[in-house]
Amino acid sequence: MKSFQDLKNEHFPYCDWRDFLKYTNPDGSKSSRQDEEALDHYFQHFVYSPEGLCIKCQQPQGNASMSDIILNRGRFRWGLRPGEGQCSTGGCGYPARAIHRDIGPIKELLLILQFHPDVITWDK
């Protein structure tokens, strides 16, 4: 398992919402600059892993669907803050957010995204 300093030294790319979302206005027109800026600002706090693996221990995080939660697939464990949690692999605990609300045009998005190492502090 990687140390937090190892994660900081890896210089992970910041999350780009365009890697997993396609956004257009309901009328089919291109998204507004204001909406794109809101999405850019919000998602830059996360790392996107297309494989859904924890960046610290490389275990699958699953997704935020109720079936994954009920069937205990993946290693995401809900925390005390609404929508947030961490990797439940023994000793890992890397923080993530699974429910994203009110981001520009998005009302709610269920997707486990781990916080970027540059935006968190780590006590372990």
Image (cartoon, helix red, strand yellow):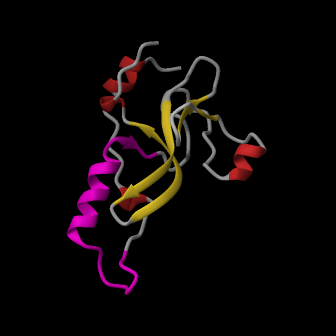
Residue that appears at 36% across and 76% down: 24
Please check the rendered image and state whether residue 104 is part of the magenta-colored stretch, yes or no.
Answer: no
Q: Position of residue 89 (x, y in %)?
A: 63, 25
Residue that appears at 52% across and 40% down: 82
User: Exactly how many numbered labels are in the figure?
Assistant: 0
Please check the rendered image and state whether residue 35 is part of the magenta-colored stretch, yes or no.
Answer: yes
Name which quarter of the figure residue 85 lies in.
Answer: top right
Q: Position of residue 9 (x, y in %)?
A: 31, 24
- 75 horizontally vs 6: left or right: right
Name which quarter of the figure residue 115 lies in.
Answer: top left
Rendered view: 87 above or below 123 = below
Q: Nearer the viewer, residue 50 or 29?
A: 29
Residue that appears at 78% across and 44% down: 71
Q: Nearer the viewer, residue 54 or 123?
A: 123
Name which quarter of the figure residue 32 lies in.
Answer: bottom left
Give the magenta part as a residue range.
24-48
Q: Residue furthest bottom?
A: 27
Q: Position of residue 64 (x, y in %)?
A: 61, 49
Q: Residue furthest top?
A: 124
Q: Residue furthest right?
A: 71
Rendered view: 81 above or below 93 = below
Rendered view: 33 above or below 62 = below
Q: Nearer the viewer, residue 53 or 27?
A: 27
Q: Nearer the viewer, residue 68 or 57?
A: 68
Q: Position of residue 87 (x, y in %)?
A: 58, 30
Residue that appears at 53% across and 34% down: 54
